Every structure is written in C-alpha cells, then in structure tokens.
Image (spheres, rainbow, N blue to C red):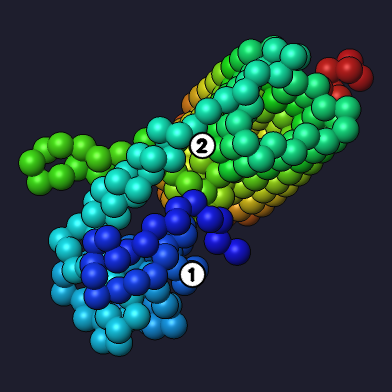
Amino acid sequence: MMRKIFNFNVNSIDNNFNFIVKGVSTVSNPKNNSIIFLNKIDLELLKRLKEIRESIIFLKNGLTAKGLEYENIVKYVDNPRLEFAKFLNFLSKNIKKNKTFKFNQSGYYYGENITIGENVIIEPFVRLGNNIKIGDNTIIKSGVVIEDNVIIGENCYIRENSVIGGEDFGIETDIDGSTVRIPHFGGVIIGNNVEIGAGSTVCSGTIEETIVEDYVKVDYSVNVGHNTKIGRGTLICAGALIGGSSMLGNNVFIGMNASIKSKMLIGNNAIIGMGAIVCTSIGADEVFTNEMADKLENIKIIRNLKQKILKRKKNG
C-alpha cells in the first residue's frame, strides 16, 4: 500500500487532466495516483507501467509510451531522476513549512500520529517526527532523532545521538552545475530486539522503506544508507559504512570500519573483515577481507589449525 504524502491536483500544472497524486512509487512496484520515474531506456520496466492510472510519469527521451498518455501525465526528459527530484522538492515545500512539534513533560519533542507501546522509555532531548510507531519495552536514549515514517519494533535499544530516518546523500546535478537534493519519503522499518549504537544513522528510503530485521545489532558510528535491507541477526561493528540500496542477508558479520558500496548483495552468513572495502557482491558463507575474498571453508581450516596448535601447547 502506498503511503499518502501529498494531496496534489494535477490540474494546476496541466489543465487537460483533473486527478490527485498522493505519493511516490517505483517503476518496479508502480502504484496509481503516484509520481514515478524511469531513468533508462528499458522496455521490460516500461511494460510494468501499462496498468498505471492517474499518475505523473517521467520517462527518458527515446522511450515511447503509447497508451500511457491517455490517463497519465507523461513527461519525456533527458534526466528523469533529476526532474522527479525537482518536482518532489516543489511539492514537499509545504510539508516542511507546516511541520510543528509538541513538548512532552518527560522532556522530548514529538510530531503528529505518534503511537508508543507499553513500558517504553524515551529520555529527554529526543525528537520524534510524524507517523512514528514504537513497540513495547523499547528504550530511546537522549539526543536521538527519529524522523518521519519510522516503525521501531519491541525490545529495541536506540542509543544516544543516533538518527533514524534522516535523508541520505541523494543528489542530482543539473546541466548548469547546480545540485538538487532528492527528498526521501520511504521511511524506516526496524524489527524487534534491534540495537542501534550511539552516533549511528539509519537513513530513510527514498520511495520504499529501509529495513532492519529482527535481532540486528549495530555498533557505534555506523551509517546505513537509503533503501538498504539488513537481514535478521546481522552484526555491524563500529564505523562501518553501508551504501544505499544494498541487500544484506541473515547473520552477516561486518567488521570495524568496513565500507560497502551501494547496491551490493551480501549473502547469508557472509563475513566482511575489519577495514574491508567491498565493491562487488559477496555470496553466502563467503569471507571478504582487505586482501581477498575466501570461502568460509578456508577460514575453518585456519581455525582448526590454530585449535590444534593450542591443544599441543596445552598438552606440553
């Protein structure tokens, strides 16, 4: 279901149409009454739009979308992502301008549509945006900022000065050299029994949610980029950087100060060593270090040798 963000009548920009756009959606999961862009000439992705109605669609010059123009506003442009960003900035001005916060007697600020479970502790100097849900027994430490459209599960621990749902570094450059920031409306979903370390950031998805599944543990000063999905039980050590739109499987281990490029796929049970720079996807059960990626079996051999050496020393 698409989240309602806007209530914009397109008649103000094109008097040939009279419908309302309410949100944004992706070309891989398009929704009616939304704003969509397709940034490349891809006929297979274009086919997914054939059932869409009453939407604004930005397409790359060179594509033809016969039939779409009857019930949608279709814009053919050189850079659909840039024009998409410009239009969202235009629509979101009123959203930001009208945002207000209330003050709770416990010492934190909050916006609208806030749902807080039982036995939740929210310390002073926390700021909650709009459309926030926090599950039972969760602890939110001082200085935390939780932006709009965030769900946090039960038994979570969000440590000091972390930011959940902030905008990532989504920038498009216009032909004149000016830059345009891409608004983020996707939000964040955090599962149950998750810990987020002090000073860490879990960025909002641009269109769909950034997802952190159950039992994930994030250490201090970690950055999780937009649209990323982190699988159940994954452990992320201090200083790690995870680029946007990366998909991490279950029970992944990421060492201190490791960096993962955007749009990487990391398989279940993978191990990424301290300081590793990951610019290629990693399969399940693989180990990636600063120097090379090895199969987990090779690591097991080394561990077994160490155990044998220690056993010999112990036996004299």
Task: Tell me the number on the disc at residue 203.
Answer: 2
Task: Work out whether residue 131 can be spotted.
Answer: yes
Q: Distance between the residues labelled 2 and 1?
A: 23 Å
Q: Which residue lies most toward the bottom here?
A: 67
Q: Write down the residue under mark 1.
A: 31
Q: Position of residue 270 (x, y in %)?
A: 63, 45
Visible in this render: residue 164?
A: no
Residue 236's spot in the image, x, y percent?
A: 63, 32
> Is the N terminus in the top left, top right, bottom left or bottom right quadrant?
bottom right
Measured as percent of width and height from the top left, residue 304 is found at 76, 36
Residue 282: x percent and y percent? 53, 50
User: Closest to the observer: 96 or 269?
Assistant: 96
Figure quadrant of the C terminus: top right
Q: In the displayed image of the protein, which residue is found farthest to the right?
A: 315
> Label 2 crowding class (10 Å Cα cut-off): few <14, some 14-19, many 20+?
many
Question: Where is 211 relative to 56, above or below?
Answer: above
